[in-house]
Image (spheres, rainbow, N blue to C red):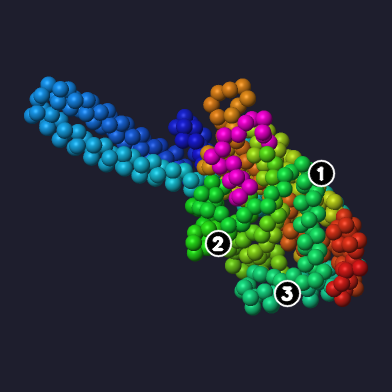
Amino acid sequence: MHDIRAIRENPAAFDAALARRGDAALSSQILEADEARRAKIQEAEEAQAAQNKAAKAIGAAKAKGDEVEFERLRSEVADKKAAVATLQTEAKKLDASLTDILARIPNTPAEDVPNGTDEDDNIEVKVWGTKPEFDFTPVEHFEITGVAASMDFETAAKISGTRFVMLRGAVARIHRALAQFMIDTHVDENGLTEINSPVLVRDEAMYGTDKLPKFGEDSYQTTNGWWLVPTSEVPLTYSVAGDVLDEAALPLRYTAHTLCFRSEAGSAGKDTSGMLRQHQFEKVEMVSIVHPTQSDDEQKRMLGCAEGILEKLGIAYRTVVLCTGDMGFGARRTFDIEAWVPGQNTYREISSVSTTGDFQARRMNARFKPAEGGKPEFVHTLNGSGLAVGRCLIAVLENGQQSDGSVKLPEVLAPYLNGKCTLRATGELC
């Protein structure tokens, strides 16, 4: 949500920032709605003051015994009361209309975000690791001999339809091991607090984390109004909604491993093979609630936490900063981490780490009390994948595949696999 006062003070700067994202200038429309709202509020306040003045005069007329004046004033107050109620209702409608306009406008990009229109304009900022070399043609994850029988798309489709998978046996265990490894690393080494959060949330939580109203079609809603979370960013971030935190409590750093659900609206025909793009998937999420001055440094720290998972797994990756045209709705700046997947001979996104500034905090009224005193200020919120578990499974399987259809697994997973680091071509761990 944008600060209406900032738009009033510098509408040209606001329009210029939106233009960098490819959006039309909106300040004139916003300020027109704001002016109408403020005028109606002032009109309602003046009518309320007139009503209060007339109400006091009723008492004076009653004290004088002037029944004629008393009845006239009483009738006048009744009329004014009705007029005030009408004006207040109109003011609320105008206020709601302005809020709705602001809620549908994306965040403005940070100054250092590169201009661009799509993913082709993203800029590579880091490359890590060595891509594996094979003496055979590597295949995609679902084609690996030791994996194929345990990655069951047909049964999942029978149960739930397309874009679902049923993992069995050793592959299911490797998937679980990856999630446990990520959580343990974030808690034990990166200092995050583990949260076991709900995956059903109310409208307010989706709105506060900028998923509503614009992106309702991308998520699933139950018949009684709950939303299935697209990521645990929603419950973790919204946990501070309406709070006024002590500055000394910041930063708050959370992590959670949850199921996530996305309708994948608009992605028909995209990544239909394998388990790259699913309606239901698992992710280890990171969320930070910080002082505004810590925001940029915290994003770098979170990026390092996510990159560190891939480095421990020995998966080659690259990091890109997204251009203005490719950033998400609520982001001020986003870094994507892309893992090397040899079966496709390309890098694929496995994490996005974003800072939203105070964009989400304004929507959910999350503030902190400055240590030196003064009015509460909005916190800054950040979120990042640490990592997407299914996509990490894909990277581990494809990078570790052997010519005989087996898979060599990263040694860091051994403690979670009872010391076993090989997936045989027959599908068992050894």
Q: In which quarter of the image is residue 156?
A: bottom right
Q: How many numbered discs?
A: 3
Q: Where is residue 389 in the image (x, y as percent from the top left)?
A: 74, 58
Q: Residues within 10 Å of mark 2 (few under 14, many from 20)?
A: some
Q: Position of residue 344 (x, y in %)?
A: 76, 65
Residue 75 as seen in the image, left or right of residue 115:
left
Q: How crowded is mark 3: few (under 14 residues within 10 Å), some or many (20 or more)?
A: some
Disc 2 element: strand
The residue that label 3 is drawn on is: 152
- Three-letter amino acid code of the residue under disc 2: Tyr
**What range of the chain is rendered magenta?**
234-251
- Three-letter amino acid code of the residue under disc 1: Glu
Disc 1 element: loop
Residue sitting nearer the eye, 136 or 73: 73
Q: Residue at x 83, y 50 (%)?
A: 311
The residue that label 1 is drawn on is: 189
Q: Distance between the residues labelled 3 and 2?
A: 24 Å
The quarter of the image holding the C terminus is bottom right
- Three-letter amino acid code of the residue under disc 3: Asp
Q: Distance between the residues labelled 1 and 3?
A: 35 Å
